[in-house]
Amino acid sequence: MDERILEFIGDLRRAELRISTAEALDALAASAEVGLTDRETFKATLASTLVKEARDHETFERIFNLYFLDLEALGEGLKKALGPEDPRVQETLDQLLDQDNLDLDELTELLMRGQGSEMEMAIRGGAQNAGLERLMYFLQVGFFSRRISDQFDWSAIERDIEKIMQALEARGLDPGQLARIRNYLELRLEAFRRMIRQHVQRELERRAYRAGEQLTREVLADKPLFALTPDEVAQMKSVVAKLARRIKDALALRQRQEHKGRIDSRRTMRKSLSYDGVPMEIVLKRRHREKPKLVTICDVSDSVRNASRFMLQLVWSLQECFSRVRSYVFVSEIAEVTQAFAAYPVERAIEWALKGAPVDYHCRSDFGYAFNRFATTELESLDRKTTILLLGDARNNYNDPQAWALRQIRERVKGIIWLNPEGQWGWGIGDSVMPLYAPACDIVRECRTIGQLGEVVDHLVHQWWRRGR
Amino acid sequence: MFESVEEVQQRFKDARYIANLRIATVVFLAARMGRPVLIEGPAGVGKTELAKTLSDVTRRALIRLQCYEGLDEGKALYEWKYAKQLLYTQLLRERIGELIADAPSLPEAVARIAGQDDAFFSYRFLSPRPLLQAIRAEDPVVLLVDEIDKAEPEFEAFLLEVLSDFQVSIPELGTVKAKHVPLVVLTSNNARELSDGLKRRCLHLFIDFPTPADELDIIRLKVPEAPERLARAVVAAVQKIRAMDLRKPPSVSESIDWARSLVILNARELDPALVESTLTMLVKYEKDLDRVKGALDKVLADTPA
């Protein structure tokens, strides 16, 4: 069982749960204390030692069911196989085992006593010998089941059953009872065979799950955003949520105690009370670190629909990190969507920003016009602490780029960060005016895939928003 | 201390606390393995109550350290009673004078006074705060560190050190080792992320709002005077209110208070007027109040008869 638990921990780690060695050891020790009889208790034990973040609970549940369903299913399977329970038969058998000194195969004893977890362990041993690691496809289930089956000496078991029947006969049981007991044993044998098959099937499920998870993470992270199917979009939402979490954690404010600066007279007086009014310890004023301000301007034309969706989701999640987040969307006209973001839940807010805002979604993109309007109307609200996050492909449809507007905006703010969902090879080609806007920006990044979005987030967190900047 | 998980549940129930299987398992493991327990969850679900009940059930004293921003080692571990030391020095000035009267040189005088260090740096002048109290306790105790997420990360690191060895070194007095390892319970409201080290060390318990069945048990246990019908109605209503998207969903302590207040008002069942007038016991924000009032008919619909 320990091995099982360690495998389980391995899968949890692959699913991005951070579990240290110490915690793994705790899990093993704790499960030894609690025992394996009750599934819910066992689950609670593993949860308390391995799951330390509330958001990981769902993943834990899912993987736990994949692994430890066996324990319950074993019981269920056996019950179904044996029909209504016959305690007298079991009693007779137990008596026989305890009293007579029959030389029985280990497995036979196991079958007779009916210990689910031990049977499972026997199957696992057999599975290892049969090379179950090479299991890959559904069609191989029958093959591997047979191979595992072959690990056990069925003829020896048959002989043992005969021995048992003879011993029982010698005790003077009548034919009716004997028949019942034989039937019972045969059923158990059958149930055991079925368990082998179930074990193989479950192993296959586990591998498919693992492969699926990996595929999601590796391939999807590099898939261009515009090419994602609706299902994949849904999957990526959780990835973006994790990105937001990373930003939140990094920006979590701590007011540190300073070592130089102005004296906080109130706190110093309070501290001096325990020294009879003598200011033995001096408390300095804490530097009030303000949350950064963020303005996001998002292109919502069809060409960058998917990318905008993720950006907006990120922005919505980050509202708490910033003292002021103002969000705008544009195609050619520009409109503020901040209220929607504050009031609506994330899904509705994004839908509204992408469809319901007062901009004409069907006209051709005109970045120049949008920047012009923004510079004209919103300039007063910008200050040195504001960062502007722009998402757009800079494809201006041969309209006037009006780069002066962006330069004007740049003068007022801390910096402009431009995320371009189009591959870098296309910048400047055709109607893309990226090279004209780039000089006014501090950071220009290609943001074609979720992976790249993650990298940008990393950069922002570790460099742009570092303490003191 | 506990032989089985079921025993934990039973003993807690006798002490009027409904411990579901998850809670009971973690308590059992903590007692068996000597590990601290970190309880996370929304406000008012019974985290602090758990620690109090644990101390009741195990008949250990409860030592409580309430955390807040700015809590430092001094206020958590110990402080010297400086004023008292000064006072004693003043009063004993003559005696001290006698001691060093015939000292041939200044260093000698200082040496003599230093030799008497123990008089002024002894436990008499030490003000032990909760952590030191827990370590020095003669009998086993339960140490409750409440709202650890309000304290600063530096304090967490310090706490982790103490929890690992249960010993503290006081420069003047030497190392103090715990005679009995306390049962440690930490609670957090999730206001911020706790440091990894602390999380790794502890067994984790996440207490969420109870299921309807559990909540009914809780009301029955805590408000036994409430008629069955009223209790059921209260649970149904509270569960529905929680399902609404409120800024602060009602907690368990609030639903218990509500049940109690309804009993005081001699209510037999819930009618809209009564609920509306007592709603502030459950819902504490203006906007939430308006929302619930607006949806009152839905909340009270199909309340069990």
Image: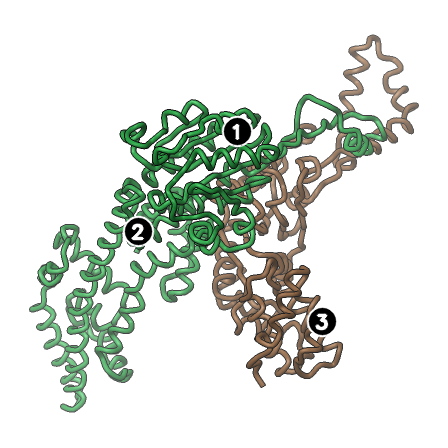
Chain colours: A green, B brown
The reply, left or right, for residue A147 in relation to residue B236 is left
Give the left or right position of residue B139, taking residue B5 as reference: right
Q: Which of marks 3 and 2 is in front?
A: 2
Residue position for label 2: A232
What kind of residue is marked 1? Answer: Ile
Host chain of mark 2: A
Residue A142 in the image: x percent, y percent? 10, 63
The residue lying furthest to the left in this view is: A155
Question: What chain is tagged by disc 3?
Answer: B
Identify the amino acid type marked 3: Thr
User: Is residue B98 toward the left or the right of residue B60 in the image?
Assistant: right
Same subunit, tags 2 and 1:
yes
Q: Do labels 3 and 1 share a chain?
A: no
Q: Residue at x 64, y 68 (%)?
A: B255
Query: Which disc is residue B146 wearing?
Result: none
Amino acid type of the residue tagged 2 in the rendering: Glu
The residue sitting at 67% across, 36% down in the picture is B72
Q: Tell me the residue that label 3 is attached to.
A: B278
Q: Can residue A54 be seen in this view?
A: no
Q: Position of residue B234 (x, y in %)?
A: 62, 75
Secondary element type, mark 1: helix
Residue B190: give x, y in percent of width and height: 56, 49
Could you tell me how far apart the alpha carbons at marks 3 and 1 are, in whole angstroms? 54 Å
In this rendered view, identify the residue nearer to me: B173 or B98.
Answer: B173
* Disc ID at residue A409: 1
Res A108 visible:
yes
Q: Residue at x 41, y 48 (%)?
A: A361
Q: From mark 2 to mark 1, how far is it between C-alphas?
A: 36 Å
Depth check, front residue: A97 or A422: A422
Image: A437 above or below A397: above
